[in-house]
Amino acid sequence: MAAVVFSSFIAGAAGLWKIVAHRAVAGEPLADAERLSVEAGLAAPASPAASAWTLRGAAGHVRYVVSDEKVALGRVQPPLGREQATLAAFIPIRKSAAWWELAQDERRAILEDRSRHIADGMRYLPAIARRLYQSRELGEPFDFLTWFEYAPEHAGQFEELTQLLRSTEEWRYVEREVDIRLER
Amino acid sequence: MAAVVFSSFIAGAAGLWKIVAHRAVAGEPLADAERLSVEAGLAAPASPAASAWTLRGAAGHVRYVVSDEKVALGRVQPPLGREQATLAAFIPIRKSAAWWELAQDERRAILEDRSRHIADGMRYLPAIARRLYQSRELGEPFDFLTWFEYAPEHAGQFEELTQLLRSTEEWRYVEREVDIRLER
């Protein structure tokens, strides 16, 4: 997409999404909360009284996707907010300094040539809708916030996708990952 | 660099750098001011009473530079703050929606294969020190803030470099560019 979409993920007592599971895959977990509200724009970090935590990100242009992949993705990528997609996953990730020291071609080689992140992810479309937010250059504690929405009948496919990605060479550069599951 | 460096460029009555020239190359100019202060961190946008404008950016990992180029750049890139570098240029740039809609390989092809942005820029090292800040996903009015420092004897080389870049295919995607020259 050409325009940047800013979103704030506010965990606390209110919000459309009920948090049903929360675990740290790598590094520290987040504070527990009952619900998650996804709001447009860059919210000010909320007061501790009002929320457990607030994470913010910007969804903008593609970073690694090349032309053929962009066309293929455009054909099958579903929108967020589908009526049947009552389950969601919110997975904030931080990669290591070693990842960010790599040149663009080295990161692309690890991400796609050797870890097949884009191609494998595409196999789970259109069942699983996905949006990737960049957080690193907002001074946030995570580099990326990934948001997924799917129908209950595709929950097994989503587990398969996350397990596949976590077994890759790319994932050796993940130093913090929190996996939060939600339903509405 | 692996860590993200945040900087705020605050134009007003105070600051190390005296603004000696200001023109819009494309699109709207900025408000006039006497001096520019470059401060670490993401300053809150200042009140109109305190500053003419504040622009903020994040300098992080490379976006287009590949491995060989990164090694070559690492050998010749000078640091900011050299004693003899008493002149500076601050050039905020915004590219068009069409640029941001391109895939990564298409942007790289325009930027380097056809416009030689990295190779031509390298010819002016180590005379001209440079830092590129990303602003787009901070919700700022520009996509990039570029900062250059050089000694008076290299001012001619700097003019040559900016003219070279502005004549490229890449520059057809620039929809706003402001060129501010400074001395300290």
Image: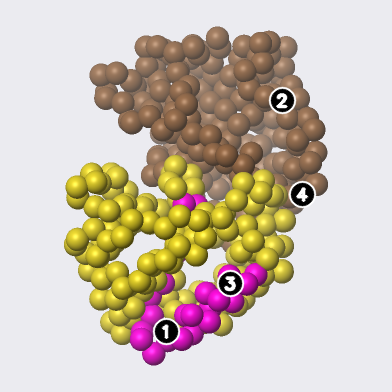
Chain colours: A yellow, B brown
Q: Nearer the viewer, residue A38 or B155?
A: A38
SS under mark 1: helix
Q: Nearer the viewer, residue A50 or A1?
A: A50
Query: Are discs 4 and 1 less than 8 Å apart at CB?
Result: no
Q: Amino acid at mark 2?
A: Pro
Tell me the residue at 39%/90% (across/down).
A153
Q: In front: mark 2 or mark 3?
A: 3
Q: Are marks 2 and 3 on the same chain?
A: no
Q: Which residue is mark 1?
A: A155
Q: Is residue A161 magenta?
A: yes
Quarter of the image for the N terminus of chain B: give it. Answer: top right
Q: Which residue is mark 3?
A: A165
Q: CA distance from mark 3 to mark 4?
A: 25 Å
Q: Which residue is mark 2?
A: B78
Q: CA distance from mark 4 to mark 1?
A: 39 Å
Using the rendered view, name the quadrant where residue A44 is placed.
Answer: top left
Q: Which residue is mark 4?
A: B67
Query: Are discs 1 and 2 less than 8 Å apart at CB?
Result: no
Q: In front: mark 1 or mark 2?
A: 1
SS under mark 2: loop
SS under mark 3: helix
In the rendered image, is residue A81 in sight? no
Q: Is residue A21 above or below residue B152?
A: below
x and y percentages locating residue B5 in the rendered image: 53, 34
Using the rendered view, name the quadrant where residue A172 is placed.
Answer: bottom right
Q: Are marks 1 and 2 on the same chain?
A: no
Q: Are marks 3 and 1 on the same chain?
A: yes
